[in-house]
Amino acid sequence: KLNHFSYYHCSTQQLYHEKSFPKQSVGGAMTEGEGHFYSVQVGDSTFTVLQRYQQLRAIGSGAQGIVCSALDTVLGIPVAVKKLSRPFQNQTHAKRAYRELVLLKCVNHKNIIRLLNVFTPQKSLEEFQDLYLVMELMDASLCQVIHMDLDHERMSYLLYQILCGIRHLHSAGIIHRDLKPSNIVVKSDCTLKILDFGLARTACTNFMMTPYVVTRYYRAPEVILGMKYKENVDIWSVGCIMGEMVKGSLLPDIDQWNKVIEVLGTPSLEFMNRLMETVRNYVMNKPQFPGISFSELFPDWAFPSETEHDKLKTSQARDLLSKMLVIDPECRISVQEALSHPYIHVWYDPAEADAPPPQISDKQLEEREHSIEQWKELIYKEVMDWEERNKNGVLKEECLDGVVNSSATASQSSSINDISSMSTEQTLASDTDSSCIDTIAGGLEEILPLALKQPTKSRLYGDNAKCSPF
């Protein structure tokens, strides 16, 4: 049973039919039918969506919601429509829905999924039950890429973009807390975006994280041990993702404390002294392990072939792994240090890595404790605020910026070397199983390494040109 939805491979060619749904004007008043709703059955769920969203097709489902691909006939682009499942079932669901909505509305970065619309078919707070989020539609989940035969250029550039997105969140004191391949999506031009902020949290709260917040394999040691955490808890997750890119499979059982110390070695006494007494006693009674060297854990043969670039080398990639997969968070590198690492810094662009931090509208995002009805009212106010801004034309122009052009380009450039031209079934990923690539281990596995276009070499060799596919 799937308990988490993810992004998926979904061909934009299958969704974009200009003759059937011509692009409509987006600069002025609401077009005919845009504000009206209709219902369609999607599996076991009924989607009641705005008339502008046509050709709904289920592409993901899980405990938190159901996702459909659709054609936005107003913007003229394919989109993803997410219906939150029972957002007001309990306080936890309601708070998570509020957190995700607030953060998605505030964050604006090229490596973070873009929120295009928010709506509910209900007309009053008393009736309010259903919440829909509309986001960019991407070509594939990182699950579909991570086990492929990536070269150093692609691997380094994908990691750079993950780190840029995280850096943007951290600059506003937001910790994602649930980074994993199924929460990262890519396009065939090698652009990448982070999604799913239902578990994100502001760092200023300094809370302890429950061990089962993060998918088990990606949990940092401080999470396993119930310690307070800071921003670089996300860096451990990136290290795990990079480890999968290199080895093509999960690291050997790094999902519980015993396995962590067997692989990485018993941490220092100084680290032990920061643990709660009961946890410290448990940890110190475990056998001592020297750990496995990173050259043995990640041997040369596991890495891509060497490139002509002097920084994109196996030795540099392994060194980055050794700095991210560190048990003691005080010794683990920060996201800024990771961006400055030679293996990543070759792509560095201040506009991407040092973008202005998002302005969080709710400064008490984490301190709030409310009843379900109070959360419901807060969410409804956010939806109404979005609708009001949309009526005034503010959001339509924002949504067009960088979204329509990229989608239109993808829809018009069909090629065997383009993910969007492939006719394969979309995949779903379990929250506890990152091996979602197994479900498509057929033609896509053979084609995707070629389909994921390289970023331009001009960025590697210093003329500061913007990234675009070859």
Image (cartoon, rainbow, N blue to C red):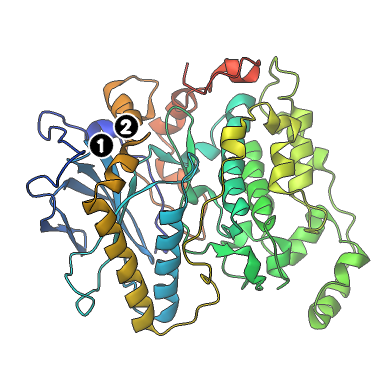
The one nearer the camera, 79 or 250, is 79
Dot 1 crowding, Cα within 10 Å, few <14, some 14–19, many 20+:
many
Circle nearer the N terminus (1, 2): 1
Amino acid under label 2? Answer: Ser
Q: Farthest residue in the right direction?
A: 269
Dot 2 crowding, Cα within 10 Å, few <14, some 14–19, many 20+:
some
- The N terminus - image quarter: bottom left
- Verify CB contact (< 8 Å) between mark 1 and mark 2: yes
Whether residue 234 is situated above or below residue 407 in the rendered picture = below
Q: Would you say 400 lies left or right of 264 here?
A: left
The one nearer the camera, 169 or 432, is 169
Pinpoint residue 128: horizontal percent, then vertical percent.
23, 74
* Picture residue at 27% right of the left edge, 64% below the top: 384
Pinpoint residue 296: horizontal percent, then vertical percent.
81, 40
Q: Secondary structure at mark 2?
A: helix
Q: CA distance from mark 1 to mark 2?
A: 6 Å
Q: Disc 1 marks which residue?
A: 77
- Inspect this view and state whether residue 118 appears: no
Tell how many labels: 2
Amino acid under label 1? Answer: Ile
* Picture residue at 56% right of the left edge, 49% below the top: 357
To which quarter of the image does residue 132 belong? Answer: bottom left
* Picture residue at 34% right of the left edge, 42% below the top: 398
* Picture residue at 26% right of the left edge, 39% below the top: 78
Q: Would you say 103 lies left or right of 139 here?
A: right
Whether residue 183 is situated above or below residue 228 in the rendered picture = above
Pinpoint residue 200: horizontal percent, then vertical percent.
53, 62
Pinpoint residue 115: horizontal percent, then vertical percent.
37, 50
Q: Disc 2 marks which residue?
A: 407
To which quarter of the image does residue 259 belong? Answer: bottom right
Q: Would you say 278 lies left or right of 144 here?
A: right
